[in-house]
Image (cartoon, rainbow, N blue to C red):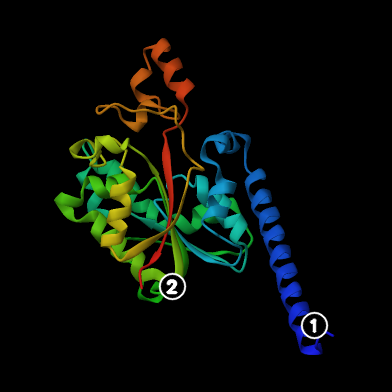
Amino acid sequence: MVKKSTWVLLLGLLAAGWLQAADSADNEAALRQAIESRSAEDRARDSARHPAETLAFFQVAPGMTVAEALPGGGWYTNILANYLGPEGTLYGINYADRMWSLFPNATDEWIAGRVKATGNFPDMVKGFTDNGIKAEGFTFSTVPAKVAGTVDRVLLIRALHNLTRFEEQAGTRSQALAAVRSILKDDGLVGVVQQRAPANQSGSGTDGSRGYLVEAEVIEMFEDAGFELVASSDINANPLDQPGPEDNVWRLSPSLRTSADDPELRARMQAIGEADRMTLLFRKAP
């Protein structure tokens, strides 16, 4: 005969499993809704960027506090703001203001626009949703004290190459990863999507200036900054992208910068698709 206490335990475990499955299904439905409600122009890149699979791999859920590095025009911001919902918080973290002047051919007008974008982040979020989500923008060098230790997920999606590019000159990556560690909860996670160079191209050719980084070197960067790898995925892999030592990511879609006047080359680049990307998940090392 099974003891009553055993039945209670079994029923409790079954109920917990059912609730977890229900939550997972609800989250998946909410994420799909956030993705599918965007414009056709934004959805056109979903087959290359895999937002549903990527955010699920990063274990992002409604109600979380999420920090998105380098939100740019808001392609992921739109999804996150609608998915996190009114109980969530979304931070947009930009490069430190001083970093913009390090880019070749940076004009005063362009720099001013990049600096201004940080403060405009809440307005950008409001343009995507009126659900009442809390939003704030700051830089890796101006993290508000109130944010320390409060963030569930930090997302660095195609944001590491320029931080690496200017690391030797200005310590940009070290500062950024220190800021990431400071804002993350003890049980928080860091999601990384980054264009991936072939492992045999390690060296000066993968300093970030071409947009590519070597996966093993990215993992080492995080380990040196006090993180450990939790998992990796080929969600965003593209084996058709086999860059040579001189190739940069902007030769491919959506930029296609090197083939504007060469229809044949442009067609070859479009056939490759977007760059091969690593997808990594980190946590704070104990």
Where in the figure is residue 98, as x and y percent of width and height? Answer: 22, 54
> Element under label 2?
strand
Q: Which residue is labeled 1 in the image?
A: 7
Res 20 → quadrant = bottom right
The foreground one among 212 and 165 is: 212
The foreground one among 243 and 145 is: 243
Res 41 → quadrant = top right
* Residue lying at 40% horizontally and 76% vertically, measured from the top left: 146
Q: Which amino acid does label 2 sit on?
A: Lys
Where in the figure is residue 221, as x and y percent of width and height? Answer: 28, 55
As drawn, 184 above or below 69: below
Where in the figure is residue 280, as x and y percent of width and height? Answer: 43, 52
- Whether residue 276 sits left or right of residue 20 in the image: it is left
**Mark pair 2, 1: CA separation:** 36 Å
Where in the figure is residue 116, as x and y percent of width and height? Answer: 36, 52
Q: Is the C terminus in the top left, top right, bottom left or bottom right quadrant? A: bottom left
Q: Which residue is labeled 2 in the image?
A: 185
As drawn, 105 above or below 233: above
